[in-house]
Image (cartoon, rainbow, N blue to C red):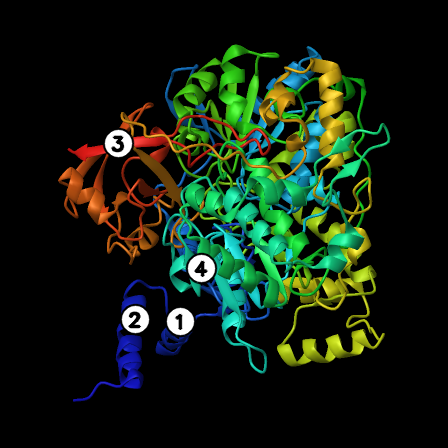
Amino acid sequence: MRVTRRTFLQVLGGTAGAAALARGQLTTTEQAGQNLERWATPEEVGVPSLCQQCPGGCGILVRTLDGEVAGISGNALHPINRGALCPKAFGGLQLLYDPHRLKGPMARDGKHGALRPIAWEEALRLATQRLAELRQQGLSHTVAILGGQYRGYRDTLWKRFAEAYGTPNYIRVRCLAPEHPALTHRLMQGVEAPLGYDLAQARLILSFGAGLLESWLGPVHGSLAFANLRSAGDRPRGRLIHVDPRRSQTAAKADRWVPIIPGTDGILALGLANALIRERLYDHEFVETHTFGFEDWVDETGQRHTGFKNLVLREYGLITVSRATGVPVKTILEVARDLATIKPAVVIGERGPSYGPDDLHTRMAIHSLNALVGNIGVPGGLMIQGDLPLTPLPPVAQDLAAKRGGARPRIDGAGLGEYLLVSDAPQALPERMLSRDPYPVNALFLFASNPLANHPAKEAFAKAMEQVPLVVSFSPFLDESSALADLILPDHTYLERWQDDQVTHLAGFTCFSLAQAAATPRHDTRNTADVVLQIAKTLGGSIAKSLPWKTFEALLHEGAQGLYEAGRGYVVSVHAEESLRKILERQGYWAPEFKTYDEFWQALLKRGAWWDPTSLPVGRNALLRTPSGKFEFYSTSLKRWVDEATKREGKTGPFVTALGGQDRGDLLFLPAVAISPAQEAEAFPLRLITYRLVTRPLGGGKNQPWLLEQPAVHVKTSWENWVEVHPETGAKLGISDGDWVWVESAKGRIRLRAKLYSGTRRDVVQIPLFGGKGPNPNDLIANEADLFRGFGLLNTTRVRIGKA
């Protein structure tokens, strides 16, 4: 007998009905059939939300069945990803259903006692009481908030809380902060808004280590740009040139991979500049009209200064650059000619980890290429999209205690001394906490951050946390850092909470994404944003006045009203409607889609995002806001900061010393990268390079086995972390593929399985960050800081390897 779905359901319905009647719960078979129909055909709803596995900002649709999350797919309306997703997005289900999630708040019995469950009322009382006591004692500045990788109104909320409470120590731990202007762009262009790389219209992309298809800004956005580069339609097919020591996924897909000696990217950029200038391939009109410091020049005192042109021609000849970088002269010339002749072109110098000790001048050298080919403020080049027209929030109300506390120096040293030009210096935090310089930390709040897993100085961080009387974690999991906390106020996972995302750093549009809770919280957790609002309300006074919203949803609702009232942009919709709107708006017509803000809000909830694809990006004048009003090869802003620091600290002060010292003269303010002779380190002959996999979320995803199971196809492995070794290096050391090896640095050693990979340089070994279960490469990396971004130098450590 063939069993159809219909007969199966009929039989099952009879069985279910009989069972229910036996329990006395049903009186008729008809009622049993109705219950079965409801079970067999659950209510299915797709809830727009946001993926939070990386900073990409992709829109997702969360599939729910009778309110239970059953799947994740891409939101086809969302302008960032257009329905496409990378593998990381699907791990959100395992975060939600992780059986090891914290079930509610936890408190520690004494500083070294065990964690025990407590009620939310008691947990909030403990946190608020300590905050109130510190403020009453004039110690509000001794509270530190360590935040991770997020943006939007959660960042706004924490900033307002810190300012109103009276602490300068809202410290962000993030290698990628595309929503903020890069220091290089500030120094050379004077911009205070993030620049967007117009990848959609570029016909040549020259990437210095930016993982377009792995981790830079989000792999989906990068992949869509790459696909557009390839499928040119009636245009010439675009080209991707990728400079990287490692044959990454981006390098493998590129039209040209340029393997380079690690840490010499800036030297190669200056070699390309040499070729462009020597062969007169640069954009003469842009350079002559819109740049400063290209030619030698004389200041108002009569002192002569070296220009970029003569610096490059004198110091960065092609043979010299080839020897320093390992890139053949022929390759340098061919890349330079492509850069000059394929238009429009864009040069990306946005490697996640630092380029090396001279990271600032390296990034300046790379960015100089954008000026030489004149692609600033043009389609296919670098653009500024402007701000989102959100409702302006009222100013933060500061009482005397807040003003006094906020005026104290930061515990991480940002904005002073060697960290003068950075907004956050998390790399310096553990040492400063241990030394209690300039004061002890009396309370530490950890939000979306796990420093004991992600910070190279995790041992020092653990000791520093031991000294803090109150450590509060908002992690929904018992991770390395929350396990040492005194109080845990567990956040929802991102599928359970209201949240937003604000994107102004992608050329071509601005975007506000909104996510409502797609699932009822599975445990006794709370949205941290709502917890902050509750704490502010309890503290009262100017703090409560500065954070007046009853819920985070109310803040989002208020902020989004500005989008409705802006008279531009649209709630995302199907492609045909968007195309018509673009055409009409470019002709000067714009018509509101909704009569009331309530209609607008409901549509925003239903579709997931608002965007403005038709507003023209600002022109070159807005992109060139330096003191000279031009692109500055010679940074007068950096010169001013150095002069002011010299007056305060002397010629040997920490800031000037960090730049290389006054002896460098004009080279301090030009894109001049030192060419150092190669040194053979006998004790540690290999250089360690770390990288991120497209299948691993921020933080590693150890509680997302679906992602750990995804193989790293280039080495055919998964689950456990590994070290990549060139086959010739392996043969020399007697190491075969799959052998267990020790990887050792001056800091420590870890045991990993070796994978032989020809895409590794012979003088390099490579370990993925958060590649899988097992040792963390941070155990090898010295806690060295990039003084001009505040983060760690992840790719400067030297190691040796041997069979375990």
Q: Nearer the viewer, mark 2 or mark 4?
A: 4
Where is mark 1, residue-wise?
Answer: 35
- Which of discs 1 and 3 lies nearer the camera? The answer is 3
Q: Which residue is mark 3?
A: 800
Q: Secondary structure at mark 4?
A: strand
Q: Kindly indicate whether the residue at mark 4 contacts the one at mark 1 (C-beta within 8 angstroms).
A: no
Q: Which mark is residue 68?
A: 4
Dot 2 amino acid type: Ala
Percent position of residue 108, x then y: 43, 21
- In the depicted view, which residue is nearer to us: 579 or 787? 787
Identify the mark nearer the N-term, 1 or 2: 2
Q: Earlier in the sequence, mark 1 or mark 4?
A: 1
Reading the image, the residue beneath label 2 is 16
Residue 116 falls left or right of residue 15: right
Q: CA distance from mark 1 to mark 3?
A: 66 Å
- Residue 312 disc label: none
- Whether residue 533 is visible, yes or no, is no
Disc 1 is placed on an element classified as helix
Q: Residue at x 61, y 22 (%)?
A: 418
